[in-house]
Image (spheres, rainbow, N blue to C red):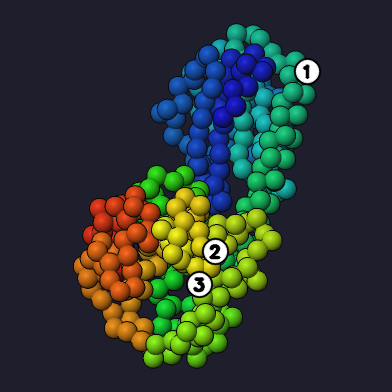
Amino acid sequence: MINTSSMLKNDYSISILFDDDFNIKDISTVGPKALNIDFINFTVKEIDIFNSVTKITPDEILASSKYGYMKKLLKDHTLDVSDIIVCPIKNGEKSFGQLYFFFFNRIFFSSEDIKIIASFQKITELLLKTKIYADRINNAYTNFAHKLAFIAENYDEDTGFHINRVGKIAGFLALKYGLPKETVRQIEKFGPLHDIGKIFIPKELLMKKAKLSEQEYEIMKNHTLYAKNILQDDDYFTVALNIALYHHEKYDGSGYNSGLSGESIPIEAQLVSITDVYDALRSKRPYKEAMSHMHAVEILKKGDSRTKPTDFNPKILELFIKYEREIGRIYDVFS
Protein backbone atom coordinates (compact mmCIF):
# COMPACT_ATOMS: atom_id res chain seq x y z
CA MET A 1 0.00 0.00 0.00
CA ILE A 2 1.22 3.53 -0.78
CA ASN A 3 2.04 5.53 2.35
CA THR A 4 -0.39 8.39 1.87
CA SER A 5 0.41 9.61 5.37
CA SER A 6 3.54 11.27 3.99
CA MET A 7 1.50 12.83 1.19
CA LEU A 8 -1.49 14.06 3.21
CA LYS A 9 0.05 14.20 6.70
CA ASN A 10 -2.91 12.15 7.89
CA ASP A 11 -2.53 9.96 10.98
CA TYR A 12 -3.62 6.59 9.69
CA SER A 13 -4.69 4.72 6.54
CA ILE A 14 -6.32 1.36 5.87
CA SER A 15 -6.70 -0.47 2.57
CA ILE A 16 -9.13 -3.34 2.02
CA LEU A 17 -8.87 -5.35 -1.20
CA PHE A 18 -11.48 -7.72 -2.65
CA ASP A 19 -11.03 -10.81 -4.80
CA ASP A 20 -13.10 -11.78 -7.87
CA ASP A 21 -15.78 -13.33 -5.65
CA PHE A 22 -15.98 -10.15 -3.58
CA ASN A 23 -14.38 -11.71 -0.54
CA ILE A 24 -11.84 -9.80 1.54
CA LYS A 25 -8.45 -10.56 -0.01
CA ASP A 26 -6.12 -8.34 1.99
CA ILE A 27 -6.07 -5.65 4.69
CA SER A 28 -3.10 -3.29 5.02
CA THR A 29 -2.47 -0.42 7.43
CA VAL A 30 -0.09 2.54 7.25
CA GLY A 31 0.50 5.50 9.53
CA PRO A 32 2.07 6.71 12.75
CA LYS A 33 -1.16 6.12 14.71
CA ALA A 34 -2.64 2.64 15.03
CA LEU A 35 -6.15 1.33 15.50
CA ASN A 36 -6.46 -2.17 16.88
CA ILE A 37 -8.02 -3.92 13.86
CA ASP A 38 -6.32 -7.28 14.34
CA PHE A 39 -9.14 -8.66 16.44
CA ILE A 40 -12.09 -7.07 14.62
CA ASN A 41 -14.24 -9.75 13.06
CA PHE A 42 -16.32 -8.59 10.13
CA THR A 43 -17.58 -9.79 6.77
CA VAL A 44 -17.48 -8.10 3.40
CA LYS A 45 -21.26 -7.57 3.67
CA GLU A 46 -20.60 -5.10 6.48
CA ILE A 47 -18.43 -2.94 4.22
CA ASP A 48 -20.41 -0.19 2.50
CA ILE A 49 -19.09 0.30 -1.03
CA PHE A 50 -18.78 3.96 -1.96
CA ASN A 51 -19.05 5.24 -5.53
CA SER A 52 -16.78 8.25 -5.13
CA VAL A 53 -14.32 9.84 -2.71
CA THR A 54 -16.40 10.65 0.36
CA LYS A 55 -15.65 12.60 3.54
CA ILE A 56 -17.50 11.31 6.59
CA THR A 57 -17.33 11.97 10.34
CA PRO A 58 -17.51 9.46 13.20
CA ASP A 59 -20.82 11.02 14.35
CA GLU A 60 -22.37 10.41 10.92
CA ILE A 61 -21.20 6.80 11.00
CA LEU A 62 -22.57 6.10 14.47
CA ALA A 63 -25.90 7.79 13.70
CA SER A 64 -26.43 5.81 10.50
CA SER A 65 -28.04 2.39 10.13
CA LYS A 66 -25.17 1.50 7.74
CA TYR A 67 -21.39 1.36 8.11
CA GLY A 68 -21.24 -1.83 10.20
CA TYR A 69 -17.52 -2.27 9.61
CA MET A 70 -16.69 1.35 10.47
CA LYS A 71 -18.77 1.17 13.64
CA LYS A 72 -16.77 -1.83 14.83
CA LEU A 73 -13.56 -0.07 13.92
CA LEU A 74 -14.49 3.11 15.77
CA LYS A 75 -16.01 1.42 18.81
CA ASP A 76 -13.13 2.30 21.13
CA HIS A 77 -11.82 5.29 19.17
CA THR A 78 -14.84 7.55 18.58
CA LEU A 79 -13.40 10.37 20.66
CA ASP A 80 -9.98 10.11 19.04
CA VAL A 81 -10.97 9.95 15.35
CA SER A 82 -12.09 13.33 14.08
CA ASP A 83 -12.30 12.93 10.28
CA ILE A 84 -12.42 10.12 7.73
CA ILE A 85 -12.18 9.98 3.93
CA VAL A 86 -13.20 6.84 2.03
CA CYS A 87 -11.67 6.30 -1.42
CA PRO A 88 -13.13 3.45 -3.55
CA ILE A 89 -11.00 1.79 -6.21
CA LYS A 90 -13.17 0.56 -9.09
CA ASN A 91 -13.07 -0.47 -12.73
CA GLY A 92 -16.46 0.37 -14.15
CA GLU A 93 -19.01 -1.18 -11.81
CA LYS A 94 -16.55 -3.69 -10.34
CA SER A 95 -15.06 -2.75 -6.98
CA PHE A 96 -11.50 -3.85 -6.20
CA GLY A 97 -11.21 -2.30 -2.76
CA GLN A 98 -11.39 0.83 -0.64
CA LEU A 99 -8.91 3.09 1.13
CA TYR A 100 -9.71 4.78 4.42
CA PHE A 101 -7.84 7.87 5.64
CA PHE A 102 -8.08 9.04 9.26
CA PHE A 103 -7.31 12.18 11.25
CA PHE A 104 -7.22 12.17 15.05
CA ASN A 105 -7.55 14.75 17.82
CA ARG A 106 -9.81 17.32 16.15
CA ILE A 107 -7.72 17.67 13.01
CA PHE A 108 -9.73 17.66 9.77
CA PHE A 109 -9.08 17.04 6.09
CA SER A 110 -9.02 20.13 3.91
CA SER A 111 -10.60 20.53 0.47
CA GLU A 112 -7.07 20.27 -0.94
CA ASP A 113 -6.62 16.90 0.76
CA ILE A 114 -9.81 15.66 -0.87
CA LYS A 115 -8.54 16.79 -4.29
CA ILE A 116 -5.26 14.94 -3.72
CA ILE A 117 -7.08 11.74 -2.77
CA ALA A 118 -9.41 12.06 -5.78
CA SER A 119 -6.37 12.44 -8.07
CA PHE A 120 -4.75 9.46 -6.39
CA GLN A 121 -7.95 7.48 -7.00
CA LYS A 122 -7.97 8.33 -10.73
CA ILE A 123 -4.31 7.39 -11.16
CA THR A 124 -4.79 4.11 -9.27
CA GLU A 125 -7.86 3.18 -11.32
CA LEU A 126 -6.05 4.04 -14.56
CA LEU A 127 -3.11 1.81 -13.57
CA LEU A 128 -5.54 -0.93 -12.59
CA LYS A 129 -7.36 -0.68 -15.92
CA THR A 130 -4.04 -0.78 -17.81
CA LYS A 131 -2.99 -3.91 -15.91
CA ILE A 132 -6.34 -5.59 -16.62
CA TYR A 133 -5.98 -4.94 -20.36
CA ALA A 134 -2.34 -6.12 -20.29
CA ASP A 135 -3.40 -9.31 -18.51
CA ARG A 136 -6.10 -9.92 -21.10
CA ILE A 137 -3.58 -9.56 -23.93
CA ASN A 138 -1.13 -11.84 -22.12
CA ASN A 139 -3.85 -14.44 -21.56
CA ALA A 140 -4.81 -14.28 -25.24
CA TYR A 141 -1.19 -14.92 -26.25
CA THR A 142 -0.91 -17.74 -23.72
CA ASN A 143 -4.06 -19.38 -25.07
CA PHE A 144 -2.70 -19.03 -28.59
CA ALA A 145 0.56 -20.68 -27.53
CA HIS A 146 -1.41 -23.58 -26.02
CA LYS A 147 -3.33 -23.96 -29.27
CA LEU A 148 -0.08 -24.02 -31.25
CA ALA A 149 1.25 -26.74 -28.96
CA PHE A 150 -2.02 -28.66 -29.42
CA ILE A 151 -1.56 -28.44 -33.22
CA ALA A 152 1.98 -29.78 -32.94
CA GLU A 153 0.85 -32.55 -30.59
CA ASN A 154 -1.95 -33.73 -32.85
CA TYR A 155 0.17 -33.51 -35.98
CA ASP A 156 2.70 -35.96 -34.58
CA GLU A 157 0.68 -38.22 -32.27
CA ASP A 158 3.57 -40.39 -31.06
CA THR A 159 5.32 -37.32 -29.63
CA GLY A 160 2.25 -35.65 -28.11
CA PHE A 161 3.24 -36.35 -24.50
CA HIS A 162 6.85 -35.59 -25.41
CA ILE A 163 6.30 -31.90 -26.17
CA ASN A 164 4.53 -31.26 -22.86
CA ARG A 165 7.18 -33.11 -20.84
CA VAL A 166 9.88 -31.03 -22.51
CA GLY A 167 8.23 -27.87 -21.19
CA LYS A 168 7.90 -29.24 -17.64
CA ILE A 169 11.42 -30.65 -17.40
CA ALA A 170 13.08 -27.64 -19.06
CA GLY A 171 11.20 -25.34 -16.68
CA PHE A 172 12.41 -27.43 -13.72
CA LEU A 173 16.01 -27.19 -14.93
CA ALA A 174 15.65 -23.45 -15.53
CA LEU A 175 14.54 -23.03 -11.91
CA LYS A 176 17.48 -25.04 -10.60
CA TYR A 177 19.81 -23.07 -12.90
CA GLY A 178 18.73 -19.94 -11.07
CA LEU A 179 17.00 -18.08 -13.87
CA PRO A 180 14.43 -15.37 -13.02
CA LYS A 181 10.93 -16.65 -12.28
CA GLU A 182 9.45 -15.01 -15.37
CA THR A 183 12.07 -16.67 -17.60
CA VAL A 184 11.36 -20.03 -15.94
CA ARG A 185 7.65 -19.51 -16.59
CA GLN A 186 8.28 -18.68 -20.26
CA ILE A 187 10.53 -21.70 -20.78
CA GLU A 188 7.92 -24.01 -19.28
CA LYS A 189 5.17 -22.36 -21.32
CA PHE A 190 7.03 -22.23 -24.64
CA GLY A 191 9.08 -25.42 -24.34
CA PRO A 192 6.19 -27.40 -25.91
CA LEU A 193 6.60 -25.28 -29.07
CA HIS A 194 10.17 -26.42 -29.71
CA ASP A 195 9.08 -28.62 -32.63
CA ILE A 196 6.27 -26.42 -33.96
CA GLY A 197 8.11 -26.20 -37.29
CA LYS A 198 7.44 -29.90 -37.87
CA ILE A 199 3.93 -29.09 -39.06
CA PHE A 200 5.68 -28.03 -42.31
CA ILE A 201 7.48 -31.38 -42.60
CA PRO A 202 5.76 -34.14 -44.65
CA LYS A 203 4.05 -36.47 -42.19
CA GLU A 204 5.42 -39.56 -43.93
CA LEU A 205 8.91 -38.46 -42.87
CA LEU A 206 7.86 -37.93 -39.26
CA MET A 207 6.24 -41.37 -39.11
CA LYS A 208 8.87 -43.25 -41.15
CA LYS A 209 10.08 -46.39 -39.33
CA ALA A 210 13.24 -46.85 -41.36
CA LYS A 211 16.29 -44.60 -41.05
CA LEU A 212 15.94 -41.33 -42.95
CA SER A 213 18.01 -40.92 -46.08
CA GLU A 214 20.55 -38.11 -46.17
CA GLN A 215 18.18 -36.01 -48.29
CA GLU A 216 15.26 -36.72 -45.98
CA TYR A 217 17.34 -35.80 -42.95
CA GLU A 218 18.19 -32.45 -44.52
CA ILE A 219 14.46 -31.82 -45.01
CA MET A 220 13.78 -32.82 -41.38
CA LYS A 221 16.45 -30.41 -40.09
CA ASN A 222 14.58 -27.51 -41.63
CA HIS A 223 11.83 -27.79 -39.02
CA THR A 224 13.81 -25.41 -36.80
CA LEU A 225 13.84 -22.79 -39.54
CA TYR A 226 10.17 -23.28 -40.36
CA ALA A 227 9.32 -22.12 -36.83
CA LYS A 228 9.99 -18.58 -38.03
CA ASN A 229 6.91 -18.84 -40.25
CA ILE A 230 4.79 -18.86 -37.11
CA LEU A 231 6.76 -17.23 -34.30
CA GLN A 232 8.87 -14.42 -35.73
CA ASP A 233 7.99 -10.70 -35.78
CA ASP A 234 6.25 -10.83 -32.40
CA ASP A 235 8.19 -9.88 -29.26
CA TYR A 236 5.89 -11.99 -27.10
CA PHE A 237 7.25 -15.14 -28.75
CA THR A 238 10.97 -14.23 -28.54
CA VAL A 239 11.73 -17.03 -26.06
CA ALA A 240 9.58 -19.47 -28.02
CA LEU A 241 11.39 -18.60 -31.26
CA ASN A 242 14.81 -18.95 -29.62
CA ILE A 243 13.83 -22.40 -28.37
CA ALA A 244 12.41 -23.55 -31.71
CA LEU A 245 15.30 -22.16 -33.78
CA TYR A 246 18.23 -23.21 -31.63
CA HIS A 247 17.31 -26.31 -29.59
CA HIS A 248 19.32 -28.50 -32.00
CA GLU A 249 22.46 -26.38 -31.66
CA LYS A 250 25.22 -28.09 -29.66
CA TYR A 251 27.47 -26.55 -27.04
CA ASP A 252 30.54 -27.77 -28.95
CA GLY A 253 29.27 -26.22 -32.21
CA SER A 254 28.33 -29.48 -33.94
CA GLY A 255 24.58 -28.84 -34.11
CA TYR A 256 22.28 -27.30 -36.73
CA ASN A 257 21.13 -25.06 -38.44
CA SER A 258 23.20 -22.03 -37.41
CA GLY A 259 26.31 -23.80 -36.06
CA LEU A 260 26.24 -21.84 -32.79
CA SER A 261 28.37 -22.89 -29.85
CA GLY A 262 28.83 -22.18 -26.15
CA GLU A 263 27.07 -19.18 -24.66
CA SER A 264 26.08 -17.86 -28.10
CA ILE A 265 23.22 -20.37 -27.88
CA PRO A 266 20.30 -18.79 -25.97
CA ILE A 267 20.05 -20.30 -22.50
CA GLU A 268 16.41 -21.30 -23.07
CA ALA A 269 17.49 -23.35 -26.10
CA GLN A 270 20.34 -24.96 -24.14
CA LEU A 271 17.91 -26.10 -21.44
CA VAL A 272 15.40 -27.46 -23.95
CA SER A 273 18.20 -29.17 -25.93
CA ILE A 274 19.25 -31.57 -23.17
CA THR A 275 15.63 -32.08 -22.14
CA ASP A 276 14.62 -32.90 -25.71
CA VAL A 277 17.41 -35.46 -26.07
CA TYR A 278 16.61 -37.12 -22.74
CA ASP A 279 12.91 -37.34 -23.51
CA ALA A 280 13.54 -38.60 -27.04
CA LEU A 281 15.76 -41.36 -25.65
CA ARG A 282 13.04 -42.45 -23.25
CA SER A 283 10.19 -42.24 -25.77
CA LYS A 284 9.05 -44.91 -28.17
CA ARG A 285 9.22 -43.72 -31.76
CA PRO A 286 8.31 -45.38 -35.09
CA TYR A 287 12.02 -46.15 -35.60
CA LYS A 288 13.05 -47.16 -32.03
CA GLU A 289 11.94 -48.57 -28.68
CA ALA A 290 11.86 -46.58 -25.44
CA MET A 291 14.81 -46.60 -23.02
CA SER A 292 14.76 -46.70 -19.24
CA HIS A 293 15.48 -43.57 -17.23
CA MET A 294 18.88 -44.79 -16.05
CA HIS A 295 19.90 -45.87 -19.56
CA ALA A 296 19.01 -42.41 -20.92
CA VAL A 297 20.94 -40.64 -18.12
CA GLU A 298 23.94 -42.88 -18.77
CA ILE A 299 23.95 -41.86 -22.44
CA LEU A 300 23.85 -38.18 -21.49
CA LYS A 301 26.83 -38.73 -19.16
CA LYS A 302 28.97 -40.91 -21.41
CA GLY A 303 27.52 -40.57 -24.89
CA ASP A 304 26.73 -43.07 -27.64
CA SER A 305 26.87 -43.13 -31.44
CA ARG A 306 24.56 -40.10 -31.72
CA THR A 307 24.95 -38.16 -28.46
CA LYS A 308 28.04 -36.70 -26.76
CA PRO A 309 28.37 -35.05 -23.33
CA THR A 310 30.04 -32.13 -25.12
CA ASP A 311 26.74 -31.48 -26.91
CA PHE A 312 25.49 -29.79 -23.73
CA ASN A 313 26.41 -26.91 -21.48
CA PRO A 314 28.49 -28.66 -18.78
CA LYS A 315 26.75 -26.74 -15.99
CA ILE A 316 23.34 -27.81 -17.26
CA LEU A 317 24.50 -31.41 -17.71
CA GLU A 318 25.81 -31.37 -14.14
CA LEU A 319 22.45 -30.05 -12.90
CA PHE A 320 20.59 -32.68 -14.92
CA ILE A 321 22.61 -35.48 -13.35
CA LYS A 322 22.26 -33.97 -9.86
CA TYR A 323 18.46 -33.87 -10.13
CA GLU A 324 17.99 -36.91 -12.36
CA ARG A 325 15.62 -38.61 -9.89
CA GLU A 326 13.30 -35.61 -9.81
CA ILE A 327 13.43 -35.39 -13.60
CA GLY A 328 12.55 -39.07 -13.86
CA ARG A 329 9.52 -38.46 -11.66
CA ILE A 330 8.40 -35.52 -13.82
CA TYR A 331 8.66 -37.78 -16.88
CA ASP A 332 6.50 -40.42 -15.21
CA VAL A 333 3.85 -37.93 -14.02
CA PHE A 334 3.40 -36.44 -17.50
CA SER A 335 3.44 -39.73 -19.41
Q: Amino acid at mark 3?
A: Asp
Q: Amino acid at mark 1?
A: Glu
Disc 1 or disc 3, which is closer to the eye? 3
Disc 2 or disc 1, which is closer to the eye? 2
**Which residue position is annotated with label 1?**
112
Q: Mark 3 Cα within 10 Å, few/some/many (few <14, many 20+)?
A: many
C-beta proximity under 8 Å, tags 1 and 3: no
Q: Quadrant of the N terminus?
A: top right
Q: Nearer the viewer, residue 208 or 249?
A: 249
Q: Is residue 12 above or below residue 295?
A: above
Q: Give the numbered dot on residue 258.
A: 2
Q: Quadrant of residue 48?
A: top right
Q: Is residue 250 above or below residue 102?
A: below
Q: Give the numbered dot on residue 195.
A: 3
Of mark 2 and mark 1, the one earlier in the sequence is: 1
Q: Amino acid at mark 2?
A: Ser
Of mark 2 and mark 3, the one earlier in the sequence is: 3
Q: Quadrant of the C terminus?
A: bottom left
Q: Nearer the viewer, residue 188 or 85?
A: 188
Q: Nearer the viewer, residue 200 or 115?
A: 200
Q: How many marks?
A: 3
Of mark 1 and mark 3, the one earlier in the sequence is: 1
C-alpha separation, residue under disc 1 versus residue under disc 3? 60 Å
